[in-house]
Image (cartoon, rainbow, N blue to C red):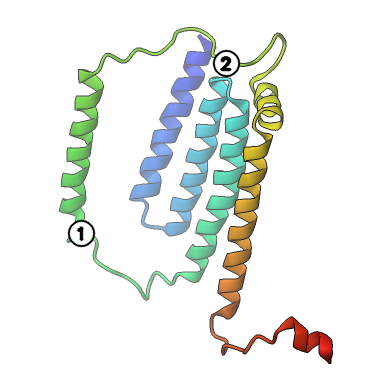
Amino acid sequence: MIEQLLFLYFGAVTLAGALFAILSRNLIYSALSLLVTFLHIGGIYILMNAEFIAAVQIIVYAGAILVLYLFVLMLFNPDEERRPLYKQAYIGVIAGLILFGITSLAVFRSHLSGQQGDFVAHSSGAGMTNTQALGQALFTDFVFPFEVASLILLVAMLGAIVLAGRRGKKKKRVRPVVDIVAE
């Protein structure tokens, strides 16, 4: 009973925060309501016994992504870039109604029924939480793909740093290592 009430609370606040994020005219209030939405989605994940996903949701989305949005908002001057959005509102309403219709049709035409009862990790042993089972699987069975993914992310980060460093500078001739050693 308490879980259903908590779900209703988290769901209602998530929907209200998302609506306020869309409908708010003040960009800072919109970002803060997006924070409320992200935090309550994390609460829904906790109710589903997905503690790791809830932690990632709060750390990545409520922490990193929202801070990125706030940095962009601080660089953005709303008085300088004022565009009338009411001219495009009918396109958004029509697209939203079409998307709602397609989603409703898919839900009502399919015979989806969720599992009833407690959700437990598939590979968890006796006495293991979902997070422990995920960690054990990640660092035993999938350690090589995990390390390859970390190397790919490292190369992408270094590439972004190199590309960002070249912007605005004149291209220099790269001297070969042989010339540098010879000096």
Of residue 103 and residue 15, the one placed in the foreground of this image is 103
Say above or below: 29 vs 15. below
Q: Position of residue 48 (x, y in %)?
A: 53, 20
Q: Position of residue 61 (x, y in %)?
A: 54, 45
Query: Which residue is rendered at x = 15% and y = 52% of the image?
Result: 90
Q: Position of residue 122 (x, y in %)?
A: 57, 15
Q: Amino acid at mark 1?
A: Tyr
Q: Which mark is residue 167?
A: none
Looking at the rendered structure, the secondary structure element under dot 2 is loop
Looking at the rendered structure, the secondary structure element under dot 1 is loop
Of residue 110 and residue 158, the one placed in the foreground of this image is 158
**In the rendered image, which quarter is residue 107 located in?**
top left
Number of residue marks: 2
Of residue 118 and residue 2, the one placed in the foreground of this image is 118
Say above or below: 25 vs 159. above
Q: Amino acid at mark 2?
A: His
The residue wearing badge 1 is 86
Query: Which residue is rendered at x = 54% and y = 51% of the image?
Result: 65
* Quadrant containing the C terminus in the rendered view: bottom right
- Left or right of 60? Residue 112 is left
Assess disc 1: are there few (<14), some (14-19) or many (≥20) residues with their C-alpha within 10 Å of its C-alpha: few
The residue wearing badge 2 is 122
Query: Which residue is rendered at x = 43% and y = 27% of the image?
Result: 11
Query: Which residue is rendered at x = 45% and y = 33% of the image?
Result: 13
Say above or below: 142 vs 73. above
- Left or right of 87? Residue 160 is right
CA distance for labels 2 and 1: 49 Å
Assess disc 2: are there few (<14), some (14-19) or many (≥20) residues with their C-alpha within 10 Å of its C-alpha: few
Identify the mark nearer the N-term, 2 or 1: 1
